[in-house]
Structures are given as C-alpha cells and as structure tokens.
Image: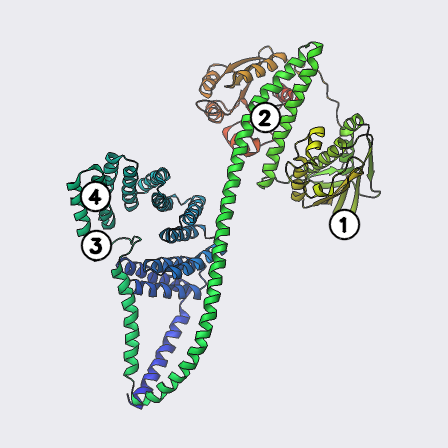
Amino acid sequence: MSRIKYYIFVFLACFCSLVFAQIDSVEDADMLSMRIQERVTQAKLESDRGDYYNALGNLEKALAIAEKINDKTNQGKIHTKIAKVRYLVGETDKANISLNKALQIQRDIDDYGNRAISYNIKGVILSTKEEYDNALDYYKSAKNLFEQEGLEEYISEVTLNEAKVYISLKQFDKAKSQLDKTIIIAKKYEQRRRLSSALIESGKVSSALNNNDLALTQVEEGLSIAKAYNILENVNEAYLTLSAIHKAKGDYKSSYDFITKHIKLSDSILDVKRENLAPGITGKYIYQYKDAQNAQLKQQIDEVSAESNFTRITTILSIALITILSLLTLSLYKNNNIRLRTNNMLQTKNDEFIVAKEKAELASKTKANFLSTVTHELRTPLYAVTGLTNMLLEEDPKEHQIPHLKSLKFSGDYLLTFINDILQINKIEANKVELDPEVFNLKNKLENIISALSNSAKDNDTNLHFDYEDGLPESYNGDQLKISQILINLLGNAIKFTKDGDIWVRAYKIDHKDNMYTLRFEIEDNGIGITKEKQDQMFDSFSQGSVQINRKYGGTGLGLSIVKGLIKILKGKIYLKSELGKGTTFFFEIPLEHVEEVKAPQVEEIKKSNKMEDLDLSDVKILIVEDNKINQMITKKILNKMGLNCDVVDNGEAAVEQVKSTDYNIVLMDIHMPGISGLEATKIIRTFDKDLIIFALTAVTIEDKMQEFGEAGFNDIISKPFKKEDFETKLYDVLSGKEVISSFF
C-alpha cells in the first residue's frame, strides 16, 4: 500500500466515523429502543439455527445500546439471553456471570417477571451440574414471583423443569404432581411444546411406577402433539421413551423399531430448523461457534501479514509495546480473576439470601393462614363453653355448683384472651395494624384506666398512685385505643406481680416542638422484680420470668410482646429497669400532637335490666342460620330469655328459602357451613331483599374479612364468642328502629 493510498484510507475512515457519529447523535431513544429489539430478534433467529457466535454478537450490541440509553429493563433481559446462549455452548461460568448481572439489575428495578425467568434459567444450569437442591430452590422462587405477578402461563416451564429434577432424584410422586400442574397450564394456554414434553415425561414416571399401559398412552399422546406441530426434539424423545417402555413390557420388536427411529431422527435432527432450542446441545453447533472465533482470528492474522513494508517498522514497535502491555495485562488479569471469583462468591451468597428471604415470606404467609384457621376452630367450641356456662349461672344453680361454674367461666375467658392475644401478635408481625388517631383527654384516659384496675389492686392489697406533670397539656390527637391497651397491659402486669405494695403511674414531658410533644410514661412497682438474665427476653413472645412464676401467677407471656409491637407502631420506644425482690419500672416514650382542650364526655349510667322489656316483641321474628347443633341451642336460648321468637336452619340453601317464604326482622348468619357459605347465602338474599337486617354471627378472624362481609351485604358483625350485653344492645337498636351503623365497614 503506497503512502497516498494510506492517507486516503485514513481520511475516508475518519470521515465515515464522523458521519456515523453525527447520525448516532441525532438518534432518539425510541429509535435506539427499536434497534435493541431488532438486534434481539435477529439473535433469536441465529440462535434457533445454531449460529451462536453471531447471536452472541447481536446480543452484546443490543446490550451496548441499552446501556447507552440507560434502559435497565432491557439490560436485565439481554443479560439473561446472553446467559442462555453461553449455557448452550457449554460456557457455564460465563453464563453464571451474565445471569448474576441480570439478577442484580432486576432486583434493583423490581422487575419481578424477568427475575423469575432468570431464576428458572439458573435452576436449569444448576440441574445440569446435579446441584438439585439448589435448583429446586430457584424453581420455587421463580414460581412464587410468577404467581405474584399473575404470569401463570410462565409457570408451566418451571413445573416441567422441577419434574425433571424429581425424576433424576427418583422422587416420582413429586414429579407426577408437578407434571400434572404443567399439563393443566399448558392446555389452558395452548402451549403445545410444553404439553407434549410433559406428557412424555409423565410416561417416564408412570413406567417407573410400573404402570406401563398408562405410560404408553401418555407418551403416544405427547408424540401425536409433537408430530402435529413438527416439534422434532419431542418426537425424538418420545421414540426413545417408547423404546424403553416396550422393552420393560417384554415387547422387544417394538422396542427395536422405536430405537431405530430414534437413531435415524437423531442423525438428521441437526439439519432441521427448530422452533426453540432445548438443553443438551450436540457438539455440531458448539464447534461452529468455536470455528467462527478461530476464523475471525485467522482473518486478523491475514490482514496483518498483508501490510506493506511501510508498516513493518510500526509492527516491530507495536510488538515491543504489546509485549510490555501484555506483562501488565497478565498482572491485571490475575488480579481481575481473583476479584471476579470473589464477586461470584458474593453474588452466590446474595442469591442464597434472596431465596432464604422468599422462603421466610412464604412461611410467614403459611403461619398467618394456619393461625386464622386454628383460631376459628377454637372460637366455635369456645362459644359453646362460655354460652352454656353463662346460661347455667343464670338458672339458679346449686350453691356447691357455683364455684365450679365460675372456674369454668374463668377458663373460657382466659382461653378467649389467649386466642385474641395470638391474633394481635400475628397482625402486628404481618404489619396489618393501622393507626386510628382521634382527639382525646390523656389525663382523663389515665384516670379511667387506673380506676378500672383499682379493684384488682385492692385484691392484692396494693395502692395505686397517679402523678400527672403540672402544666402538661391534657388534650392530644393520637390513637387512644392503642395507648390504653399499652397502659392496661403494663399496669395489669404490675398489679399481678405486686402484693401488699405500691404502684406509681407517672406521665410527663421530655421534649416538645411547636405542638408535637414527646411524653414519657412510667409504671413503677415494688413487687417481685425481674432477674437481669431475663430482662433482655421480657418483650419476646411467650416469655416470662421463670417456670415457677408462670405456675404461680399465670398469664400467656404475650402481653409485653404486644406492648412492644404497639409502641413501635406509635413510633415510640420502651425499656425497663428492675432488681429482683425490689420491683420493676417500665418506661415508654411516644410522640403526641397537642390540640385544643376537649370536654370530657359525660357517661350515662347504663341500666343493667333487660332492655327488651320496653319493646313489643310479639310480632318479632328472628332466623338463626347455624350448622352446629350446640351453638343453635345456645343462641336460641339466649334469644328466648330476651323474649324473642326464632326459627333455626342449618345451611345456606335453607336460609335463602326460609327468607323467601317468611318475613323476618333479623337474620343471624353463620359463615362456614356445608353447601353454600353464609357469604354466598347473603349475596343471594340481597338480590331479592335489600332491607332485611343480616348480622354475621361468626367465629372467623374479622379483621381479615371486613371488606368481604361488607361487599356480601351484611349490616354488621357479631363475633363469637360474644358478650351477652353487646349482643342484646345490637338487637335492641335494630328492633327499636335505630339505624345500623357497623364499626367494621
């Protein structure tokens, strides 16, 4: 090449670079996004026909564009696709690096759907390395994310991969369960390839379980679908599986025929353009990938050898420079490898942490569902215990029976308190407790709580003292119900562990800015105290001072755990100091907003007599819908004692028919019943009677069902087991014409 030609070449190269740089500079984000999609589409076509080298090149160019426009979503997706190509050509380590990059981006931008796809591919890679437990963890995480995002159609691929792992582990029952799920989803979304593969794998499982007739039916169905849609790799797998099944049945001729078909198809399958690429790539395309790399290197060598004499001196100098740079590069390469291995290890640990976190979240949901079910099952018989006990106490029992009935009532009330405490702990841990602020008088609230617990203190010969700081405002805007619950728990605790002593309740300001006050409350006693070893555990669930204290004083050990959770919700903090034998002081601080003074509400004295005596009940009709015979009897007897007539049915269908034929004033509807539920029955009734008063008389966890009850058409909820006074008040309000306003919805 002459000097003139050389300069012309350099000029043209610079000119072209300048032109293309100007073109790139005017391309907008939309155009670049289209180029990304074009590159990705082209890469898929190349990958499908086994041209992995060019597929990888297009994906890397698409990635560069995505990074240029900071398109994080496409960056994550492209890294995942690169990982898949790397895996297909046997570069597992590089595939893992790309997959880790994809997962990091997808976590940062909360791209749950594509993260699930990455998890699935990670599981496939681990499966090929026979790391089956880790693979199953990633498959489960992928399923959870697909379910969370409502991407049910993607789940079939994950369940199919899980089934293959279980087949490898010879856990055929689990494999069958996953294959059944795959078949259902694949049929629903017309996923022919996946359906065919699932049926063939089901045949393998059935054969392993010695049901060869069913196995033949399943594989033949899968083969039929594969042939109909030209899915050659599934046809080939079906031939191999059918050969094995016929051999197991002793039909060696059929076995030979199918293995011959399998070998013949295997020889020609690499020449067929396949719709998707399955794991287990043969060596042909991998060699093509390597050959393409070698061809590029050879081309570069040829170009170098074609240089003119003018470039030889430059080449010699370049070689010297390259040698020096190579030594530096070698050093950097070693350091980079060390850093890369460290990053991979950290990324693996991070992935394990993510999987563990998702397992913990799933366990938490399972626990919540378990508690909801168990508490419902406990409340239903407890309704019978408390209801029958109250009835017996009101029916002039013999004198020697009264202590036994009171003990039974105490046990029922204790068990109900325990159940309610468990539910509240569960709600706090699940972050389902919400603040309900209102304006209230703090000093009056404290005085009322102390007054309410004064009888318990007198029973222990204990004196209560109250100190409210002089000049401290009394009116605040806050969640007075939660504050009351905290104070009742702490003061009740102090009374329980203090006999013949004193308890001090103090409230004072520690800081304020404008209308925001930080108040400190102290509950100090001179009771038995707490050992230093136990003080750090006092706010844990089910924690008490010792086994001996538990036996002597009773209690569930949940009160302080609830207190700590409520104070955290109120953005406060709690701590204690105690000395064994000298007493305990609990301190808690919460922020409250001072508002204008509110007048203390005047409490009207409520008469203890039966309110129903003031009403004409002769034409009142009430329908009880309850499937439990004991609960039917109790509710009916309570209503009869109030002077009310009632009918009883034991299922939702009968309730609907009864309401159609009879005019009722009130319906008391249970929820869980055989046939249609109370919710469904109420929805049906509302189609033809909008005005009938319907109460949900139920033992379900109300907080979880409020919206559902309101949408079904209930007027209000009466939670079992209920207090008779509350039950009577609600019925009285309805029958006296007062509008029903539910406190739940």
Instruction: Give the number of the disc on residue 378.
Output: none
Type of the residue with mark 4: Ser
391 vs 127, nearest the viewer: 127
Residue depth check, mark 1 versus mark 3: number of the one nearer the observer: 3
Residue depth check, mark 2 versus mark 3: number of the one nearer the observer: 3
- Pick whichever of labels 2 and 4 is earlier in the sequence: 4
Q: Provide the residue designation for mark 3.
A: 269
Residue placed farthest to the right in the image? 470
Asked if 675 appears above or below 158 in the picture, the reply is: above
Secondary element at image label 1: strand
Density class for disc 3 (Cα within 10 Å; few <14, some 14-19, many ≥20) is: some
Secondary element at image label 3: helix
Density class for disc 4 (Cα within 10 Å; few <14, some 14-19, many ≥20) is: many
Q: Position of residue 142 (x, y in %)?
A: 42, 48
Left or right, 672 with respect to 465, comes to left
Residue depth check, mark 2 versus mark 1: number of the one nearer the observer: 2
Q: Provide the residue designation for mark 1.
A: 512
Q: Provide the residue designation for mark 4.
A: 243
Number of residue marks: 4
Type of the residue with mark 2: Ser
Residue depth check, mark 2 versus mark 4: number of the one nearer the observer: 4
